[in-house]
Amino acid sequence: MKRAQKEELTPEELDNRLSGITLSTGNVNKKYIVRDIVFATDRIETDLFSPEVNANDVFSGVYRQLKEIAFEYEADAVINCHFEEKYVEYQGKWVVEIFAYGTVVQFTQTTIG
């Protein structure tokens, strides 16, 4: 049975599928095969260190990109993720540029016996 492509899913169905994909800054304690190394970027006009700003919201764009890439690979996780950010002036405004990368993996089934 072929998995659905992103374009075939409603936004709610896609969000549900993406929520099942693991993102981790470390390794996972499951057997897996490596599919690929992937990258994501985002640029946001915000003051990351302002008390009114939720850093999780700022990074949510690259989180989603990594999960969407894993979904396209029909993979289960992106592990060993790294995130870098820097403030730069872009078109006359100060923005946070975020660069992220990780390893897309497919969990493998194990049998005992």
Image (cartoon, grey):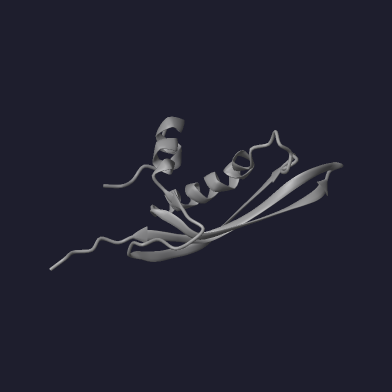
Q: Nearer the viewer, residue 83 or 50?
A: 50
Left or right side of 7 for 54: right
The residue at the far bottom in this view is: 113
* Residue 9 placement (x, y as % from top left): 41, 35
| Residue located at (43% from left, 51% from top) | 22
Say which quadrant the C terminus sits in: bottom left
The residue at the far right in this view is: 92
| Residue located at (26% from left, 47% from top) | 1
* Residue 108 placement (x, y as % from top left): 30, 61
Residue 83 lies in quadrant:
bottom right
Q: Nearer the viewer, residue 51 or 109?
A: 51
The residue at the far front in this view is: 51
| Residue located at (71% from left, 50% from top) | 97
Left or right side of 37 for 4: left
* Residue 77 placement (x, y as % from top left): 42, 54
Left or right side of 56 for 109: left
* 5 is higher (above) or lower (below) than 31: above
* 108 is higher (above) or lower (below) than 59: below
Q: How many marks?
A: 0
| Residue located at (58% from left, 42% from top) | 60
